[in-house]
Amino acid sequence: MKKTVFYSMVHENGKSIAKRQNGYTDGKYNYYKNQWGTWFVIHPENGLSVCADSTRKAAAARAVALADRIAAAIERNGEQTREAFKKALEAETEVA
């Protein structure tokens, strides 16, 4: 794992936005910890959380265990979620 900066989709003030996160990557997923100590696993193509757990190691293991289900969800909704992330990211980077 190495440190990285990335964006994830989050809900704030009733809308979905792309939010900059300081976290880690393993080359497949991105990881960040929120203010309550929960580690989220983020799919880099769409910025969506695929799972979460109390430690980064546990979150990574959960993502591996759910790999087939994650791949199936991406197969079903990949284009739609990528487009939504792209639009949110464009809106965020225009502001920054």
Image (cartoon, rainbow, N blue to C red):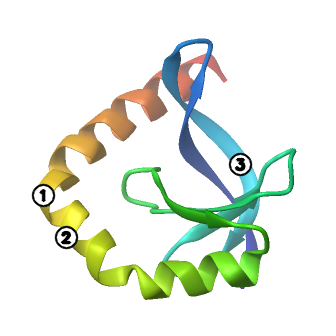
Disc number for residue 76: 1
Helix, strand or loop at label 3? It is strand
Quarter in which the C terminus is drawn: top right
How many tags in the picture?
3
Q: Residue at x 54, y 13 (%)?
A: 14
Dot 2: what SS? helix
Marks 2 and 1, how far apart at CA: 6 Å
* Residue ID at (62%, 12%): 13
Quarter residue 11 falls in: top right
Q: Pick the residue in front: 81 or 4.
A: 81
Above or below, comparing residue 23 to residue 67 in the picture: above
Q: Residue at label 2?
A: 72
Q: Earlier in the sequence, mark 2 or mark 3?
A: 3
Residue density around tag 3, few if under 14, some if 14–19, many if 20 or more, within 10 Å: some
Residue closest to the eye, 77 or 45: 77
- Amino acid carrying label 2: it is Ala
Tell me the number on the disc at residue 47: none
CA gap, disc 2 to disc 3?
26 Å
Instruction: Quadrant for the N terminus, please.
Output: bottom right
Residue 16 at x, y percent in the picture:
48, 25
Image side of residue 37 versus residue 88, left or right: right
- The residue at the point 19 percent across, 70 percent down is 72
Mark 1 surroundings: few (<14), some (14-19) or many (≥20) residues within 10 A: few
Mark 2 in CB contact with mark 1 (< 8 angstroms): yes
Above-or-below relation of 23 to 2 = above
Corner quadrant of residue 30: bottom right
Report the disc number at residue 21. Answer: 3
Q: Residue at image x 19%, y 42%?
A: 80
